[in-house]
Image: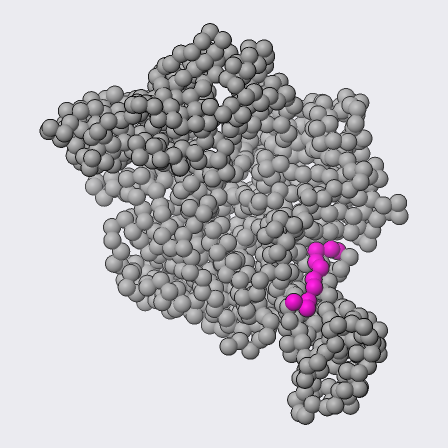
Amino acid sequence: MLLPKFEFYEPTSIQEAIDLKKKYRGKAKLMAGGTDLLVHLKKKLVTADHLISLAKIKELSQVQQAGDTLKIGTCVTMSQLSKSAVIQEKFGAIKTASDNLGTHLIRNRATLGGNVCNASPAGEALPSLIVYQAQVRLQGPEGKRKIPVESFFKGPGKTDIHEGEILVGFQLPLPEKNYGAHYLQLGKRKSSEINVVNVAAFVEINPADQTVKTARIALGSVAATPIRSFHAEDVLTNKAPGEAVFYEAGEAARHKDCQPIDDFRGTAAYRRAMIGVLTKRTLETACKLAMAQ
Amino acid sequence: MSKFDVINSYAPRIDCPDKATGKAIFTDDLSKPGMLYGAMLQSPHAHAKILSIDTSKAKALEGVKAVITSKETGSVKYGVSPARYDETMFATDKVRYVGDEIAAVAATSLEIALNAVALIQVEYEVLPAVLTVEDAMKEGAPQLHEAFTNNLCAEVHQEFGNVEEGFKQCDIIKTTTMKNKRQDGAFIEMQACIAEYDRRGTLTLTTSTQVPHYVQRTVAMVLGMDVGKVRVIKPYVGAGFGIKAAANHQELACCFLARMLKKPVKMNYTREQVFMYGRARHQFSHTITTGAKKDGTLVALKHECYLDGGAYTSFGIATVYYTGSLLAGPYKLPNMSYDGYRVYNNKPACGAQRGHGAVIARAVFEQQMDMIAEEIGMDPLELRIKNMMNTGDTTCNDLNMSSFGMSECIEAVRDGSGWDKKKGNMPKGKGIGMACGFFVSGAGFPIYRSDTFHGTVIVKLTEDGGTALVYTASAEIGQGSDTAFAMIVGEALGIPLENVRLASGDTDMGVDLGAYSSRQTLMTGHAAKEAGEHAKQQVLEVLAEQLDTPLEDMDIKNGCIEFKNQTPDFSALRTRYIKEHRGWTDNPESEKLTFKEASRIAFLEKGSIVGTGKYRPHWLGGKFKGAAVGTSPAYGCSAQVAEVTVDMETGQITIDNIVDAHDCGKAINRNSVEGQMQGSISMGIGETMHEEVIFNDKGQVLNSDLAEYKIVTAMDMPPVKAIVVESDEPNGPYGAKEVGEGAIMPTIPAILNAVYDATGVRMNELPLTPERVYTAIQAYKERSNA
C-alpha cells in the first residue's frame, strides 16, 4: 500500500491555512500530526488532492494559561500535554489520557486537535475534555466561534466543523478548589491499545458538608460519540461520596446512559458491565483527589 | 569455572554492532541497477471459480514490463511436504482464500506495478465458502480440493499400548476440551525478495527466509531449472518463527519475472499481505482424556484434535503429527492414542510456528496434570516429578531422551519462584501455576526423503594465519546462530571468537536445511565443530612434522600452541614466520608459539588450509506410520512458574512474573539462550493473552496490522528469571541442544494454572481477553451461587 499522491502545503499563519482550505474546498484535508489521517489515506478510507499541514503555525502548538482559562493549541501533541506543568497540576484526567494514547512514537506526533477532529467514539482524550468542559475554538472564513466540545461530536468521524473551518484549539476553565478528576480505560493489553471502553469523571466537593456539589462523567466507546452519563451524575449530586454511591452511579451509567454495540473488540454486554466498573473506579479516585484538596 | 574457552560464556553477538547502529542489511535495504518492482494480484473472494483473466489493460500501462498468470508460468504443483503438493504459483481454475495469488506484474516503479494490478480484470463465479472446521466437515459442504474429499487434508490415527485397558486401571479420569486461536508470527521484517538472472543462466534470489536450501529446491522445481543454477542468499532477517520456513508465492513470482525479463525484480509483502499469507500457528480444538491412579501414576491418555488448516497444506502434515506425538513425554506414559484431523477451509493456510503443533496440546495436558494433583491432594510439582521420565528413557512412541534435565528444571523453578511458600498461600485474586514441556532439537529427517547431510560447514584459515573464516549455508534469522557457530569454531580450533569471521545464509556455501525445528545449534553446530577440528588437525599435522613432536602431544588453546610435555624449540619456525612478515608491525614475541604463526607455516607447507564438517542424525525412531515426525537426536526441556493477578471485576490479568528453567544441554552463548527463553515467553504470553487473527464472514482478516493484532508490548512483559540448566546431551556438539522452541511449551499452561489458582476458573479457550475471563468468572459465580 502506498500513500496516494497529493499536494502538500505548510502555511505559517491561520489565515493562510483558511485561504488554502477555501481555495481547494472539499479536495483539501487539514493535517495536524497525521497519525490517523495518513493511515486513512493509505488505506483509501479518505481521499485528498491537497494536504494542508498546520504544523508550521507556531501559535497552534502552545499551551497557555491566561487568567482563569487554559488555551491548548490544536497541534499540541500528546507528549507535550504529558509534560506540561499546568496539565499535570490541574488537569490530571487529560494527563492520564495523553500518557495512554498509542505508543511513544505516536504520542510524539498525535495532537489533541487531531484526536478531537477524528471523532472516534473510543478517542482517548475526548471524555476528559468533556468533563473539564472544554470549548472547541473554530476559525473560518466567516470568523471565529466557540462551542462546547460535548456538542461538537455528531457521530463516528463526524463533527460540527463547518466547511472551510479550522479547529484552532481548545479553551478550558481552570478548575477551582475542592475538585478531583480521573480517567480510566480498558483494553486487551497494557499499552498501545484501542479502548474497549474509557471513562472520565470530574467531581467538585462542597467543603461545608463534604457532599458532591458537581459531578461530570463522560463515557467513551459505548455510543456513536463520547457521551455524558447524566444519570450517574444525578446519583452522586448532593450525596456524600462512598462505595455504595459509586457503585450505584456505575450501575446508572451501565444501564441508563450507554448504548454500546457488539464489534470485534468486544460485545455490548461486556462494554456495559465495564462502564459500571470503570465509572465506579474513576469516581473513587476523583472523589479522593477532591477531598484531599 | 567453565572448562571451555569460547563457548558457554556470555558473548556479545557478532551481529550486534551492525544491528545496534542500523548498519545491518536486510533485503528491503537492497536495490540493484535497473531493478523493476513487482506486485501481485490476490483474490478478493474466499472461494470462487476463475472464468477469465484479462491482462491487456495492465500490459498496456506505460512502465509495465510483464504481467504473468498461470498461463505464462504453468501450474507446477509444490508445497512443503512432497506428500501434499497442493499449491501452484498462481491459481488456475479457482481461488480458495482471500489472498490466493492470481497474477503478478513487473514495472519500473512500485506505483505503476500496483496500478497495473488494479487493471487486471478477472471474471469470477463466486462459490460458497467454508470458514470453520465445523462447516467444512458438514455433509454437502463446499469442497476445496478435488483430491481430498470432505475437506480432509490429513488424518492420523495412532495407538501405543492399550488405552482402553489403561483406563480400566485408573482411579481418576479427566476429560477436557480446549481451543486456541489462529496466530500470526508478527515478525518485524515482512517478507521481501530480489531476484536476478544473469546471462549465463544463473538465477540469484536474495530473500527474507529461514530456509535458503528449501527455497532453492522449490524455485528450481517450479521454474524447471537445475538446482545448481539457482542460488539463494539470505541477508539479515527480522525473524520468521516458522512462517518463513518454506518458499512463498512472491519468491516464485519474483524469480519467474526476473528470468523472463532478465532484469532484477524486487517484491515486498505489506503487513496486510503477511496476514493474508498466514502459515502461522493453527487453531487447534483438542479433547484430551487423561487417566491416573490415585497415587498419581499416569496410566493412559486419549487425544483427539481438529486443526483449522486453511486453504492449503503448507506444513500441515507435520503439524498434525507433532500435535499427537509430543504428548508422549516428558512423563512416563505407557498408553497413548491419538486421532488428529487437519481440515481445509477458505482461509489462509496455517503452518508451523514456534513449538510446532504441540503448544496447545501441551496447554491442555498440563492443566489436566494440575486437576489430577488437586483431586488427589498432591502438590502439582510433586505429581510431575513422580511421573517424570529418566535420562535414557524412551517414550511409548519411540522418542529417546538421551539427555533429560527435566527434574533439575522443576527444582530450579521451585527454588527460583519460592513455590513451596507460595503455593496454596496466595492472597485473593492472585495465583501461582507451573507447567513443563519439551521439544525436538532438530527434525530427525529432512522434509523430502533423502540421505543428504543436514548441514555442512567449511572453515578456511586465512593465508596470513590470523583468522578463521567460517562458511555455512545456515540461517541467522535473529536467533544468534551466526555467533553460536563462530563460537563453536573458535572453541574447536582453539582460538578466540574475535579471530573468527563468519558468512552464512548462502546456498553456494554448502547444504544446510535452515532454521526450523530448533535444529541448527545441534546439527549445524556439529558440522561447525567438525570443520574447526579438521582445520586444527591439519595445522597440527604440519607442526608435528616441523617440530618433530607427536601430534597427540600438542593442542591449540586461546590462540596458542600448547605442548603436553616440554615445549620444543620453535625459534626456527618463528624466524621463518617473521621473515615472511618483513616490514609488518605485529611480530610475535610471546613465550608460546601462536596459532597465527602455526597456521601461516601450515599454509606455507600445504597451501590454503580448509577444514570441512558435516552432520546428519543417526537413524532415529520407530517404524510406525508418522514415526519420522517427532523423532530427534535430542530433546530440550523446560519448566516454568507463573504468578498472576486477576482483576475479578474486569477480567484483566496481569502476569506478575515468570521463572523459567530450560535444559539446553550446554549453553553455547548464554546471552542467546536467555534471549530465546525471554522471547519464547513473550510469544507464549501473547498467544495466551491477546493474539488472535480475526476474520469476518467473508473470510477477510479484520485485524491485519500490529495495532489490532495484539502482540506483547514492553508493558505486558513481566520480569522473567531465566535459569539455564545443562544436561550434557551426548548427541549434541559440546553437549548442546535446543532452546528456541521448547521454552514456549510451558508458558501457556503455567499461566492458565495460575489463573485457575487465582480465580477457581478453568479457561478452555484462548486468548484470555478481559472479556472472556470476565464472562467465565461471572458464570462461575452463578454456578457457585446456584
Q: Residue furthest right?
A: B200
Indicate the position of residue A120 as horizontal and vertical percent values: 43, 24
| Image quarter of residue A95 | top left
Residue A65, placed above or below residue B425: above
Pinpoint residue B146: horizontal percent, then vertical percent. 66, 37
Q: Residue at x 29, y 60 (%)?
A: B423
Q: Which of the two residues, A58 or B747, is positioned nearer the viewer here?
A: A58
Q: Is residue B79 left or right of residue B128?
A: right
- At horizontal 73% and vertical 86% (from top left) the residue drawn is B551
In this rendered view, identify the residue nearer to me: B604 or B691.
B604
**Residue B244 or residue A288, whichever sits in front:** A288
What is the span of residues highlighted in magenta in the rendered image?
Answer: B498-507
**Residue B408, position as x, y percentages in the image:** 43, 70
Q: Is residue B28 visible?
A: yes
Q: Is residue B743 left or right of residue B248?
A: left
Q: Position of residue B281 (x, y in %)?
A: 54, 46
- Which residue occupies the extreme top position in the image? A142
Q: Going 34% across and 23% down the picture, which residue do you hit? A: A66
Q: Nearer the viewer, residue A175 or B418?
A: A175
Q: Quadrant of residue A3?
A: top right
Residue at the far front: name it. Answer: A67
Residue B62 position by quadrant: top right
* Left or right of B413, for residue B87: right
Above or below, B438 against B308 in this view is below
Report the quarter where the C terminus of chain B lies: top left
Count of marks placed on residues: 0
Residue at image location 47% in from the left, 39% down from the top: A104
B702 horizontally vs B770: left or right = right
B501 drawn magenta: yes
Using the image, determine if residue A48 lies above or below residue B745. Answer: above
